[in-house]
Image: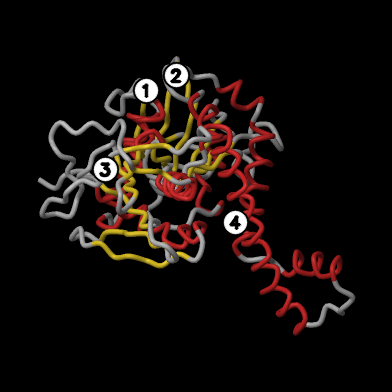
């Protein structure tokens, strides 16, 4: 299993079991120990590599413990403090990490609730852990840009000096990205004032700010939507041939409603035409599903009636159907847990984004571990 596959595996475990975990100890057993073992590659049952309940008495604070210490060459390299899944991670919860940072050789401190991992070092002052993390990993919303840096902390390629050399950029770029994301979700008064001052002569009264806050939120969403659409069009223009793409004729459905191609069917030479709108819709569904699985696992098959988007090119794992062959109206067909299809009207292909959670839920149902 590759490093990326290990992260996806542990993320699937968190997604499938988080609601059933009620305690910090259960969080450690279910999520954090597998992360240390599968992702970072350390043997959690070898005290020369991982020491649970690590103690290093410091001044008047004696007997306090850090949940895990990861060792290398008999020296502490990484300290991990754990909280219960769902608990908020705040710097005030990391008091042991602060104290142990100054009395061990550790350069990396981790505060985690099993889903989110905050990684700290000592950029601001030597041997004193920073207040802000330099790297944040959320297993349910993975930022792939940080994975190469995280991989440097694995047993196989441990290189803490390399991580720390790039930690300052990671710290501020990551913090800026999170602030920008927050502003996009809910524009702050400061941003609204800035934008209002550039497009209007109105005074920054409470009523004007309230009005422009709604306008700013709408403008941001429209802008992002337009940018995504431009990227999709650009990608299609670069990667798709000018001539229509042909695919399989419509297949019969089995009792579950999934496509079952006729035996021996050859899709070449069929009279089915795949349109640019169908391909654009496919790219949007694929982009949404990529939060759950690798993009290459999302495929498509066209038919005379609808355009099917599949997981693992498996006609029994339909993620969505695009009903774009009507003369005027377009729909997306999505399935509930009983595989009953519900069709949603689309004014525009970009409206697929409004159904992102239903798409992700369908992919999660297909990838969830089988219940014994």
The numbered mark, 3 or 1, whose residue comes first in the sequence reads: 1
Q: Residues within 10 Å of mark 3 (few under 14, many from 20)?
A: many
Of the residues tagged 4 and 1, which is closer to the observer? 4
The image quarter containing residue 13 is: top left
Q: Are marks 3 and 1 in contact (CB under 8 Å)?
A: no
Above or below 349: residue 219: below
Q: Earlier in the sequence, mark 4 or mark 1?
A: 1
Q: Is residue 201 left or right of residue 213?
A: right
Q: Secondary structure at mark 1?
A: loop
Residue that label 3 marks: 249
Q: Nearer the viewer, mark 4 or mark 2?
A: 4
Please provide percent x and percent y for residue 150.
50, 30
What residue is rendered at 12% in x and 51% in y? Answer: 254
Q: How many marks?
A: 4
Mark sitting on residue 225: 4
Local secondary structure at mark 2: strand
**Foreground disc of the pair 3, 4:** 3
For image coordinates 31% across by 59% down, the residue present is: 334
Residue visible at 81% across and 70% down? 196
x, y percentage for residue 135? Answer: 57, 39
Give the residue at mark 1.
49
* Cα gap from disc 2 to disc 1, whole angstroms: 6 Å
**Mark 1 Cα shell of 10 Å, populated few (<14), some (14-19), many (≥20):** some
What residue is pinned by disc 2?
72
Say which of 124 and 285 sits in front.
Answer: 285
């Amino acid at each position: 299993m590759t490093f990326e596959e290990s992260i996806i595996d542990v993320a699937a475990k968190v997604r499938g079991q988080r609601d059933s975990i009620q305690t910090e100890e259960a969080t450690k057993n279910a999520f954090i120990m597998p992360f240390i073992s599968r992702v970072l590659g350390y043997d959690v049952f070898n005290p020369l590599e991982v020491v649970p309940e690590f103690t290093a008495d410091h001044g008047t604070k004696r007997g306090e413990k850090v949940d895990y210490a990861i060792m290398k060459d008999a020296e502490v390299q990484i300290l991990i403090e754990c909280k219960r899944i769902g608990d908020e991670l705040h710097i005030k919860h990391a008091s042991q990490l602060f104290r142990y940072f100054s009395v061990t050789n550790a350069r990396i401190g981790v505060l985690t609730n099993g889903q989110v991992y905050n990684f700290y070092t000592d950029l601001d002052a030597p041997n004193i852990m920073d207040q802000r993390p330099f790297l944040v990993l959320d297993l349910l919303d993975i930022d792939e840009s940080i994975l190469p840096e995280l991989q440097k902390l694995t047993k196989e390629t441990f290189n803490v000096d390399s991580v720390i050399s790039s930690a300052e950029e990671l710290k501020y770029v990551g913090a800026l990205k999170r602030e920008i994301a927050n502003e996009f979700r809910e524009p702050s008064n400061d941003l609204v004032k800035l934008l209002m001052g550039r497009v209007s002569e109105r005074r920054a009264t409470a009523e004007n700010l309230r009005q422009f806050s709604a306008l700013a939120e709408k403008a941001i969403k429209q802008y992002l939507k337009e940018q995504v659409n431009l990227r999709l069009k650009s990608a299609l223009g670069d990667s798709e041939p000018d001539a229509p793409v042909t695919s399989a004729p419509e297949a019969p459905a089995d009792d579950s409603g999934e496509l079952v191609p006729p035996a021996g069917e050859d899709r070449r030479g069929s009279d089915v035409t795949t349109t640019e709108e169908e391909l654009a819709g496919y790219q949007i569904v694929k982009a949404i599903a990529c939060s759950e699985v690798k993009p290459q696992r999302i495929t498509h098959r066209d038919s005379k009636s609808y355009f099917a988007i599949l997981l693992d090119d498996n006609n029994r794992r339909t993620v969505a159907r695009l009903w774009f062959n009507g003369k005027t109206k377009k729909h997306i067909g999505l399935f509930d847990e009983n595989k009953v299809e519900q069709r949603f009207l689309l004014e525009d292909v970009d409206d697929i984004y409004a159904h992102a959670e239903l798409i992700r839920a369908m992919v999660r149902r297909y990838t969830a571990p089988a219940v014994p």
